[in-house]
Image (cartoon, rainbow, N blue to C red):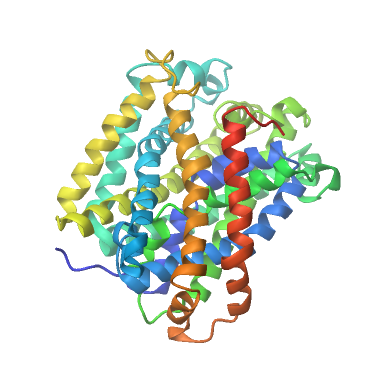
């Protein structure tokens, strides 16, 4: 078995963990959910949830990883033998997400190339995105490029791969995000979009807004995926978990906020705030935004910078998802990093091809009414993420007790939010997460409509 690597310092850990959290969840999913569910009200609800639920879950997962020095596959069992099964469920989440995440990463890679080669007008056509993903070979080529890039980073390991990539890409990501946000909000017509995004309207507060924001929290902050446990196992015992968690939260939420500040006002510039444009959902980035870029002065350059930004974020997240699986194989089967990485890469390629063909020659294949990709997304994000999050809180709150986590956090100083943490992890978090689990499943199956 290989000696367990560690990050060289807190900065490397924070940037790597933030790089995991900052991904398509922030730059693709957060803006379209904010646009769809009330703008400023969604933003306010999300921020409140991030500093409460997000903080508690992230502290818990990082502490579990550092305390056990194991991947999630083994970490839960090390804390309590009867709860070892939870580690297997937690590892199943990245296993399901990895192939289709890399497929979407391939779409982003394609759009980055298209924008960089000056074909923004072509990408702005209504039929472009649909024609691209339904093609048999083109999406597979870009998918393979993306998954190969991810695999190479994993092969180099924690210090030479993940930490080094994060130290370069995360500051670059911040600079590009800030620059694009400033550019967008200074365009004519952007003011209405900024107002919609920043000013909460009580009329927009609903159960659906709350559930969408809480669901986004898991996706955006890489919670309940085993990722933060894996990264926590590489975190030095000399560093303070509470402070590092706050820094990751700030980084992640700031990028999500800026992504919304880029995209929502952009839609207003292009469409005048038409509600149909705001409700485009997942296609907002690939269908609506190219139109926005094409309509703006210098839109090709802006579009290229934007998709470079999304590509950076997608790679840092896909690396963390793959690392969670690779680490589990290393811990469980005592194999080398190279062999474990190769196995995960081959698996990802095979299932990723299946997902891609689900939009093309296999578009008639459905599972319980879902396309292949949508089914994997539903099982992982609507079922497993809240399930793992809820069960983790139950285990910590009532089986190993909160003191097991608190003692790990207090290795390097006082845990200032100790009382708040205990109340949240034992009662508030599991109850609310159970609510989102039930509602998400019922809505996904068409039983409930909000």
Residue 117 in view, yes or no: no
Determine the residue located farthest toward the bottom in the rendered image: 413
Answer above or below: position of 296 versus 371. below
Q: Position of residue 363 (x, y in %)?
A: 43, 15
User: As rendered, which of 100 and 118 lies closer to the eye?
Assistant: 100
User: As rendered, which of 89 and 223 lies closer to the eye?
Assistant: 89
Answer above or below: position of 94 versus 158. above
On the picture, is 166 further left or further right than 192?
A: left
Q: Residue at x 16, y 51 (%)?
A: 338
Quarter of the figure with residue 272 = top right
Task: Name the quadrant of the C terminus.
Answer: top right
The mark total stands at 0
Q: Residue at x 41, y 16 (%)?
A: 365
On the picture, is 375 further left or further right than 29?
A: left
Quarter of the figure with residue 14 = bottom left
Q: Position of residue 287 (x, y in %)?
A: 58, 25
Q: Position of residue 139 (x, y in %)?
A: 37, 24
On the picture, is 300 further left or further right than 408?
A: right
Q: Position of residue 262 (x, y in %)?
A: 64, 44
Answer above or below: position of 429 versus 412. above
Task: Name the quadrant of the N terminus.
Answer: bottom left
User: As rendered, which of 221 and 369 lies closer to the eye?
Assistant: 369
On the picture, is 3 further left or further right than 283?
A: left
Residue 92 in view, yes or no: yes
Q: Residue at x 54, y 55 (%)?
A: 175
């Amino acid at each position: 078995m290989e000696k367990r690597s560690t990050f060289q310092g807190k900065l490397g850990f924070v940037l790597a963990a933030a790089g995991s959290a900052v991904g398509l969840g922030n730059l693709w999913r957060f803006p379209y959910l904010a646009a769809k569910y009330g703008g400023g009200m969604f933003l306010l609800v999300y921020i409140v949830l991030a500093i409460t639920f997000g903080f508690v879950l992230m502290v818990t997962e990082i502490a579990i990883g550092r305390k056990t020095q194991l991947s999630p596959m083994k970490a839960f069992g090390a804390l309590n033998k009867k709860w070892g099964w939870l580690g297997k469920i937690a590892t199943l989440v990245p296993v399901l997400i990895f192939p289709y995440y890399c497929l979407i990463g391939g779409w982003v890679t394609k759009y980055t190339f298209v924008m960089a080669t000056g074909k923004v007008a072509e990408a702005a056509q209504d039929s472009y995105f649909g024609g691209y993903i339904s093609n048999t070979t083109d999406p597979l080529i870009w998918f393979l490029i993306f998954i190969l890039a991810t695999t190479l980073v994993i092969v180099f390991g924690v210090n030479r791969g993940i930490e080094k990539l994060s130290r370069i890409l995360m500051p670059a990501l911040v600079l590009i995000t800030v620059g694009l946000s400033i550019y967008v909000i200074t365009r004519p017509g952007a003011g209405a979009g900024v107002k919609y995004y920043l000013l909460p309207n009580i009329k927009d507060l609903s159960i659906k807004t709350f559930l969408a924001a809480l669901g986004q929290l898991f996706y955006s902050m890489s919670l309940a995926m085993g990722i933060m446990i894996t990264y926590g196992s590489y975190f030095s015992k000399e560093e303070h978990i509470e402070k590092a968690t706050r820094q990751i939260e700030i980084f992640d939420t700031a990028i999500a906020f800026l992504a919304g500040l880029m995209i929502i006002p952009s839609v207003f510039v292009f469409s005048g705030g038409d509600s149909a444009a705001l409700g485009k959902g997942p296609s907002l980035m690939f269908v609506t935004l190219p139109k926005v870029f094409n309509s703006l002065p210098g839109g090709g350059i802006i579009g290229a910078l934007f998709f470079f930004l999304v590509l950076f974020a997608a790679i840092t997240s896909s690396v963390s998802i793959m690392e969670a699986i690779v680490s589990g194989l290393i811990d469980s089967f005592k194999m080398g990093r190279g062999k474990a990485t190769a196995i995960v890469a081959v698996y990802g390629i095979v299932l990723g091809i299946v997902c891609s063909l689900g939009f093309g020659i296999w578009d008639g294949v459905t599972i319980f009414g879902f396309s292949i990709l949508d089914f994997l997304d539903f099982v992982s994000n609507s079922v497993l993420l809240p399930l793992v999050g809820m069960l983790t809180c139950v285990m910590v709150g009532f089986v190993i007790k909160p003191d097991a986590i608190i003692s790990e956090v207090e290795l390097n100083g006082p845990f200032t939010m100790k009382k708040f943490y205990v109340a949240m992890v034992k009662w508030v978090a599991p109850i609310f997460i159970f609510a989102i689990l039930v509602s998400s499943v019922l809505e996904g199956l068409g039983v409930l409509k909000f």
